Image (tube, rainbow, N blue to C red):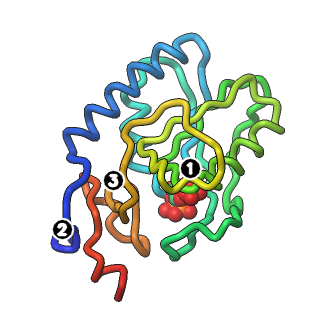
Amino acid sequence: MNQDIATILVTTEQINDAVARLGQELTAEYRDKNPLVIGVLRGVAPFMIDLVRAMDCYLEIDFIDVSSYGDATESSGAVTVLKDIDSDVTGRHVLLVEDIVDTGRTLEKLLELFAGRGAASVKVCSLLDKPERRIVNVTADYIGLSVPNEFVVGYGLDFRQQYRNLPYIGVLKPEIYQN
Ligand code: PRP
């Protein structure tokens, strides 16, 4: 698996530092709010697990699964809810957690969805931001790291469902996704 990576963009140590910083910021924000922390499957899985353990406050977790890319490398523009959360968000402080904001289409759809459900507040935490790729004008409230417009995999991010288990974030060799 590692031989398919051209360069390491974000090391495990840099990921850990970003998670620790975000955990401190979110602990301060949500200390008395018992937030509902909602992970956007599937790419968020490693980050979600690490992030909630870095938050020192009462909270609940839930997950939503949306699909925009399928197995393509670029967003199709259509965002579909594949699995909804089980919790009632009425009056709750919602924190949406993403692995990456790319075109912004997924985030726009999620913000629309939760705005109509009577949450007390909706904020977004994304491990990565890829601002060069933005099509829709949305931004996460909490961002771990900004990355350039390259094909990144690892720590949740996939290519054809592979590489999510890499403990770092790397740039995939072009010959891998061009084949
Ligand atoms: C990825 C990522 C975000 C979304 C960001 O999900 O996890 O949810 O794309 O892209 P956008 O800003 O262009 O909408 P994907 O649909 O690939 O599913 P996955 O998390 O299961 O890999």
Q: What label does residue 113 carry, if any?
A: none
Q: Which residue is mark 1?
A: 40
Q: Of label 3 and label 2, which has the lower sequence position?
A: 2
Q: Dot 1, how many residues are within 10 Å of its Cα: few (below 14), some (14-19), or many (20+)?
A: many
On the image, the x and y values in percent for residue 97 come to 53, 40
On the image, the x and y values in percent for residue 123 come to 61, 31
Residue for point 25% across, 48% down: 10
Q: What label does residue 155 carry, if any?
A: 3
Q: Amino acid at mark 1?
A: Val
Task: Indicate whether 17 appears above or below 82.
Answer: above
Q: Amino acid at mark 2?
A: Asn
Q: Of label 2 and label 1, which has the lower sequence position?
A: 2
Place residue 141 in its image quadrant: top right
Residue for point 63% across, 59% down: 66
Disc 1 element: strand
Q: What label does residue 2 carry, if any?
A: 2
- Please say if the residues under marks 1 and 3 sit with CB atoms less than 8 Å apart: no
Disc 3 element: loop
Mark pair 2, 1: CA separation: 26 Å
Residue for point 54% across, 44% down: 39
Q: Is residue 61 visible?
A: no
